[in-house]
Amino acid sequence: MGEYNIKNHEKRLQESRRYWDNLAASFDDEPDHGLRDPMVLEAWTQLLKAWLPSTTGTILDIGCGTGSLSVVLAGLGYTVTGIDVSPSMISLAQTKAAANGHQIKFQVMDAAFPQLSPQQFDVIICRHLLWALPEPKQVLQRWIECLKQKGRLFLIEGYWKTGAGLHANEITAMLPSSFTHITIRNLSDDPNFWGGNVTDERYAIIADLNL
């Protein structure tokens, strides 16, 4: 990025950090964030089990928030790293992991430019974040570098009534050609994911890296 774009990005990053820091304490009040309802927790657990490799491996949870999905993943036997722009979210995630007896590596990090060693994860999972990042197509290309050969990308996204978000076909059009076997799973029709009925577009995209 040029100097102007770098300054612009840093400003946006600081604003995002403040925003999510302020929301951290109440973040888990949303059913699909805190996973406190057993039915919601079970729905997400079964979704992950259905689409993750059957053997244990390494998973990067991008935009991990308070660590709810990271804890579920660790409970399934995976080695999990979680990154988030918000120090307050990461602090809550660390507390949650410890309370559940899991060792998860959490780091404060910019999801758009992850500072991680290449080819170290079997799976990258990201929930409701890609749509909010600048230049998502370029972001996806950077994320690829963190995946091992034959790795899997697992995106949970949506397009909401407010007009925010991305349609599923927009994301699949952004995916680099090195991703194959792309599956779109509709998540709008199961209220157990969300703690109630929803009417907007919510979905999962699962894509395998053919390298």
Image: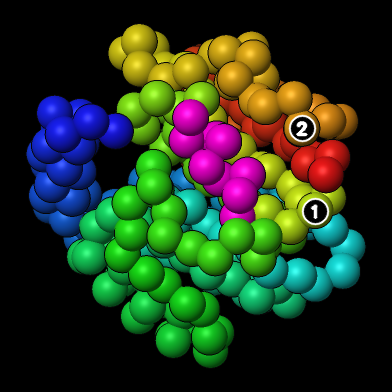
Q: Which residues are magenta?
A: 138-146
Main SS of the magenta part reads helix
Q: Residue at x 67, y 27 (%)?
A: 176
Q: CA distance from mark 2 to mark 1?
A: 10 Å
Relative to 90, does residue 187 appear above or below in the rendering? above
Residue 95 quadrant: bottom left
Q: What is the quadrant of residue 54 in the picture?
A: bottom right
Residue picked out by circle 1: 149
Q: Position of residue 81 (x, y in %)?
A: 53, 69
User: Looking at the rendered structure, which numbered label has been put on residue 35?
Assistant: none
Q: Quadrant of the C terminus?
A: top right
Helix, strand or loop at label 2? It is loop
Q: Secondary structure at mark 1?
A: strand
Residue at x 37%, y 69% (from the top left corner): 107
* Marking on residue 178: 2
| Res. 45 in view | no
Residue 201's place in the image compared with 148, above or below, is above
Residue under the point 83% across and 30% down: 180
